Amino acid sequence: MVIIGVTNSIFSGEAMDIYINKILKQMAPLEPPRVDAFACDNIAIFKANVVFNEAREFDDYEFIIPSAKFPAVSVDRNKSLVVENNKLFPINPQQLHSAIVHENITIPYYLPLFIDKTYFQEIAYSIFGDRNVFFENKSVSISKNLQGLISLFMQESEQKQTGYQFILQSLTAQIVITLIREVKNNFQCAISHLNYTDKKCINTAISFLVENYQRNITLDEIAKLVNYSPYHFIRIFKAETGKTPLEFFQEIKIEKAKELLKRRKKNITEICHICGFNNPSHFTNVFRRKVGTSPTQFRKDFFK
């Protein structure tokens, strides 16, 4: 089901352009109509009204939020799945899907939301130690919290006030974590029984760590952010994620380094400093311990 078109210029910046173009290339050779786009470097939300009947699969996670009656869809070999109005319907990477209609149709509007697979799975790995998040293809109600995060993302992307890029990065992490919590998936049995306040604080801390991977952050700084003592914060954080906050933070840095190593644009020393490591030697030692190979060898193996 091809659901987006050539975007307008609401988004800007190289990283955003790269991600939007990545989605559009997977739609070729179709030439869909223009739609509004609200984007960051790992997420894109479109406001579209044309639903195409041609089957497609995307490399990234896709979530459909229709504002009006939407046709039934086929996902992989499951036919006639209901996409309910004002609910969220998830589609996993590489799932072939199509709207069950004889020709393209127009509806008032719907929001297709795409999230980069690597980024999504990086957060999943940091929390669960496993990247393979798989959602059930079934419409689910959208919480007020998730609605608010998506609306704020669209607003910040459109208005582009001072510092909006940092807000978009934080909102992207919060949207991903909220989707994992609220949409039925293979990890939900691993979600702990911590109370709402503790979960909210951990969510805040994870978002802070993800958007500040380039810094050196202390345990006291994170604990102060969520108004917990360092001792109590370590205890609830490890109960939720299986890692201490600093172990978790180090893995975020390594995952970001791996992402940068796959792009060729930066050398090893530059990536070391971008990801907040003190020196290349320390970076290499941590990377080897976590990944099992050096940054240089990782890059060589990737581009073989």
Image (tube, rainbow, N blue to C red):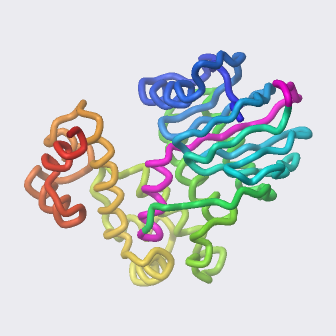
Q: Residue furthest front?
A: 77
Q: Is residue 99 left or right of residue 236?
A: right
- Give above or below for 27 relative to 73: above
Nearer to the camera, 239 or 80 = 80
Query: Which residue: 54% across, 43% down?
Result: 60
Could you tell me residue 168's position as x and y percent? 54, 40
Q: Is residue 257 left or right of residue 85?
A: left
Query: Which residue: 74% across, 37% down?
Result: 111
Query: Which residue: 31% across, 60% down?
Result: 217
- Give above or below for 12 relative to 287: above
- Give above or below for 51 relative to 192: above
Which stretch appears magenta?
A: 102-129
In the rendered image, residue 113 lying in the magenta stretch gets the answer: yes
Task: Choose top left, top right, bottom left or bottom right for residue 28.
Answer: top right
Task: Choose top left, top right, bottom left or bottom right for residue 174.
Answer: bottom right
In the rendered image, residue 124 lying in the magenta stretch gets the answer: yes
Nearer to the camera, 18 or 282 = 18
